[in-house]
Amino acid sequence: MSGAHVDLNSDVGESFGRWELGDDDAVLRVVSSANVACGFHAGDASTLRRCCETAAAHGVVVGAQVGYRDLAGFGRRFIDYDPTELTDDVVYQIGALEAVARVAGTRVAYVKPHGALYNATVHHAEQARAVVEAVRAYDPELPVLGLPGSRLLAAAEAAGLRTVREAFADRGYTPEGTLVPRSEKGAVLSDPAVVADRVVQLVTEGTVVAVDGSTVQVRADSVCVHGDSPGAVAMATAVRDALGEHGVDLRAFA
């Protein structure tokens, strides 16, 4: 595996005011890319600035994690948006985080949808196109991070944007290669050793074991460990160490 590499990303910046979620400082010492909330599903201005400053200090690349305007639901509830409104909301979020990142000494280097928007753009062609239109209009040089085989990545590729395939370290997979809904058994994994072994298999063999025991082909350029998962830091550290033991380096894609 000499010369092999993969990106390790995590969702950060999701605290709001006095409500704290995850240990961003610790996570940002491990990962190579940070999906920073943009204030719509989570995150306040001060949290986002501190997060970007920490990312910059550790050489971690910053991405805009855009979502539905749904603080109460943490962006995990589907919203039937007008496509133009969704495009405008995504542009707004990228621009807001770009300003915070610039003040913190870094920049927005890619875009990834969050939560229900991420899941919607796997199959929802209209919302996928709306997100892609926002990225294309804002900066066509920005890569789009998403699920392999999704409408999002297909639309991004058709628009001439760079696409980056993502897999999930701590989420269960269906036999079709999509994520198990969080409401179902096996959706979220929490054992650092199990998660690390899954990621090594995913990166070195291009496969993952689905919830029904079948083996699914999953090719990924970046692997996500959710920052709000229990034991996120331990899982991210275990993944990093296990990949290193197999000769795989962590390297940001952007």
Image (cartoon, rainbow, N blue to C red):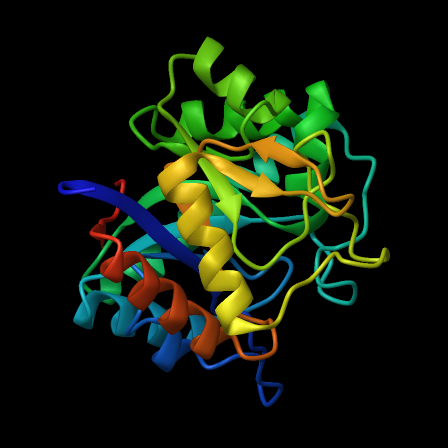
Question: Compared with residue 216, is residue 149 higher up or lower down, i.e. above or below?
Answer: above
Nearest the eye: 171 or 107: 171
Asked where in the image residue 33 lies, by quadrant, the reply is bottom left
Asked where in the image residue 80 lies, by quadrant, the reply is top right
Q: Position of 91 compared to 236: left or right?
A: right
Q: Could you say where residue 5 lies in the image, as x and y percent from the top left? A: 24, 44
Q: Position of 195 compared to 76: left or right?
A: left
Check the image and name the residue furthest to the bottom.
18
Does residue 226 appear in this view? no
Question: Compared with residue 247, is residue 122 higher up or lower down, i.e. above or below?
Answer: above
Check the image and name the residue furthest to the left.
3
Question: Compared with residue 41, is residue 164 higher up or lower down, i.e. above or below?
Answer: above
Q: Could you say where residue 169 lies in the image, as x and y percent from the top left? A: 52, 55
Q: Could you say where residue 232 lies in the image, as x and y percent from the top left? A: 51, 74
Nearest the eye: 163 or 18: 163
Q: What residue is at 62 percent from the left and 49 percent from the top?
A: 67
Nearest the eye: 165 or 90: 165
Q: Position of 141 compared to 164: left or right?
A: left
Specify the quadrant that holds the C terminus: top left
Q: Position of 88 compared to 48: left or right?
A: right
Question: Compared with residue 19, is residue 177 higher up or lower down, i.e. above or below?
Answer: above
